[in-house]
Image (cartoon, rainbow, N blue to C red):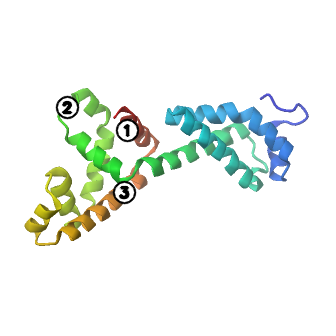
Amino acid sequence: MAADNLYNETDLFNKVAMGDEKAFKTIFDSYWSQVYGTSLHLTKKPELARDLSQDIFVKLWENREKLTGIANPSSYLYTLSRNLVIDTLRKKVFNASNIDFLVEYFQSENDSPQEKAEYRELDQLLKRAVDSLQGNLKEVFVLSRYEGLTHDQIASRMGITAISSKTYIVRALRKIRIFMEEHADGHILLLLLALLMKS
């Protein structure tokens, strides 16, 4: 570590824990490359990686009282970086438009078997999320997204209003997003991010 020779890494973290801004700047300068490299490796997007790296150091400063006695600062920063990036990706990638994209992608016949195999875990997670829906939520979602029916057609078939159909879709997408957020590990998030970047 290219830090001030007066302190070892643990001393620097202890000083930051006491609010020493000079020690924090030394850590920032010394560890920026590592934190940015971790963020870039996980996101594959330089601008997002830069933003996340800044957020990581902000979080480090805001929670500085937890830094006392950290035995391996490099490992601590790696874990902090990885967790923040994964949490951010989880929030970014699981939204309604991306869920719709996934449904269409896995129904498409245009993709090669190899491409389908690469994303099998993601496909299985999506199917589990849809299977977790109950009653009308699941029925409306399947009719809309898998069978391609309009809200008017769904309303006619199920004996509900078109507005109810739209409401069920919004609720179904929200439940699918929550299910996938809760059950996706870092590997799944990276698969989804890669797929969205490819599209």
Label 1 packing within 10 angstroms: few (<14), some (14-19), many (20+): few
Q: Position of residue 8 (x, y in %)?
A: 84, 36
Q: Nearer the viewer, residue 109 or 185?
A: 109
In this view, 38 is above or below 170: above
**Three-letter code, disc 2:** Asn
Q: Which residue is mark 3?
A: 179
Which badge, 3 or 1, is on the more N-terminal residue?
3
Of the 4 image quadrants, the one containing the C terminus is top left
Q: Are marks 1 and 2 in contact (CB under 8 Å)?
A: no
Please indicate, yes or no, whether residue 84 appears anywhere in the rendered image: yes
Please indicate, yes or no, whether residue 10 appears anywhere in the rendered image: no
- Mark number, residue 110: 2
Q: Is residue 171 left or right of residue 55?
A: left
* Disc 1 to disc 2, C-alpha distance: 16 Å
Which badge, 3 or 2, is on the more N-terminal residue?
2
Label 2 packing within 10 angstroms: few (<14), some (14-19), many (20+): few
- Mark number, residue 196: 1
Q: Residue at x 15, y 72 (%)?
A: 160
Q: Position of residue 121 (x, y in %)?
A: 32, 40
Residue found at the far right of this picture: 6
Q: Nearer the viewer, residue 158 or 20?
A: 158
* Eye-nearest disc, 3 or 1: 1
In this view, 163 is above or below 90: below
Instruction: Name the secondary structure under disc 2.
Output: loop
**Three-letter code, disc 1:** Leu
Q: Quadrant of residue 118?
A: top left
**Three-letter code, disc 3:** Phe
Q: How many marks?
A: 3
Q: Residue at x 84, y 47 (%)?
A: 21
